[in-house]
Amino acid sequence: MTGLERLPAAATADALHAIVSDEPALRPGVNALGKTLGLNVAQLRRLPNGSLPVYADEHRVLKLFPPVHAAAASVEIGVLKAVTGRLPVPTPAVHADGVRDDWRYVLMDRLPGVDLSSVWTDLTRDDRRRMAARAGVLCRALHEIAPPVIEDWWPQDWPNFVAEQRATALERHHRWGLPQPWLDQVDAFLDRVPLATQPQVLLHTEVMPANLLAAQDEGGRWSLCGLCDFEPAMRGTPEYDLVAVAIFIAEGDPTILREALLAYGYEAAQLDDDLSRRLLAWTLLHRFGNAAAFFDLLPTPHTPTLPALATSWFGVT
């Protein structure tokens, strides 16, 4: 194998950022790996979404993990093997995994359907209500699967992770650009909202249109037909997983969020202000919970307080 057929070095996050967008640098190594794995390289296409290089032919998906994200490959592989055939929608079966030029790779099934985010704006409100209910059922089924044993699975200590996220919340949201007066309220709000750290279940952490697949039936009605991208999976409190459903599927619509939560298994009496505030608290603590960015997607309350924001974003009445 010549140097031109190797995957490029990407030992740091900065190097990865440059390499991920450099398709000419990646492609020779990808083609060489694809041939080794028996893929039809002529059909192999780069998929547009995601922070990691992902390629697909008609039947298989090849996902690449540079050395800086090697641990994420172990999580993806371990969780996919644990959930295959056990969820209400299909997940990719793993066919091969290994190391090539210091990159980890996973070869898995290519599921039918389209990326739900690509058709999201075309869905009716009734479509979204059904999607929300299915997402609720999907999360509940996922949370009932025992987390697999994965070496060095981060975070190893969930209560410590929550405590660290709490300690760094103000700095993190300041860095992400959360405006005043919201920023001034973060610490006091989190101090007032009690959050349980038990039970600890298997979390996907990003059950959202970008990671869901959908298909139309003969009548043109959309339904969920797959869930993918498990490399950010964690073990933690169930409500942490509902943040993405609430933000990216309900989008501030209380009726749609209610559908998701009831389908998950909440009783109607549990859908109250306390739950809305817990969901906002988990958003502020979420590793991907960039609240400043969510103002472009979700409604802003008339009163600039975090309790009002909890009702505006996560209200269910």
Image (cartoon, grey):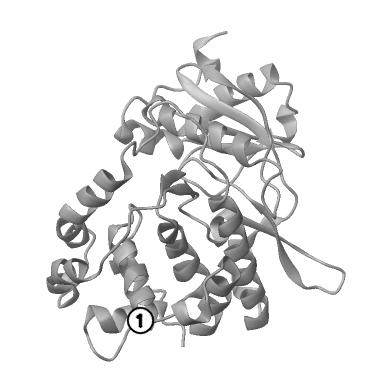
Q: What is the total number of numbered labels drawn onto the structure image?
A: 1
SS for callout 1: helix
Crowd band around label 1 with a 10 angstrom C-alpha radius: few (<14), some (14–19), many (20+): some
Q: Position of residue 266 (x, y in %)?
A: 52, 71
Picture coordinates of residue 143, whole percent (x, y): 53, 52
Q: In this view, does 142 lie above or below 316?
A: above
Residue in view at x 21 percent, y 50 percent: 163
Q: Quarter of the image containing the N terminus?
A: top right
Q: For this rendering, which residue is in front, 94 or 274?
A: 274
- Say which residue label 1 marks: 273
Residue at 42% x, 64% y is 243
Visible in this render: residue 252? no
| Residue ID at (54%, 41%) | 146
- Residue 47 point in image, percent of width and height: 60, 45
Residue extending furthest toward the right = 218
Rendered image quadrant of residue 218: bottom right
Q: Which of 84 and 102 is in front in this view?
A: 84
Report the amino acid beneath label 1. Answer: Asp
Residue 107 in the image, given as x and y percentages of width and height: 64, 30
Q: Quadrant of residue 127?
A: bottom right
Outermost residue, bottom side: 302
In the figure, is residue 62 to the left or right of 255? right
In the shown orientation, is residue 136 left or right of residue 150? right
Q: Where on the picture, by quarter, is residue 126? A: bottom right
Tell me if residue 54 can be seen.
Answer: yes
208 is higher (above) or lower (below) than 249: above
Where 165 falls versus 275 (above or below)? Answer: above
**Closer-to-camera residue (51/42):** 51
Residue at screen point 50% across, 50% down: 204
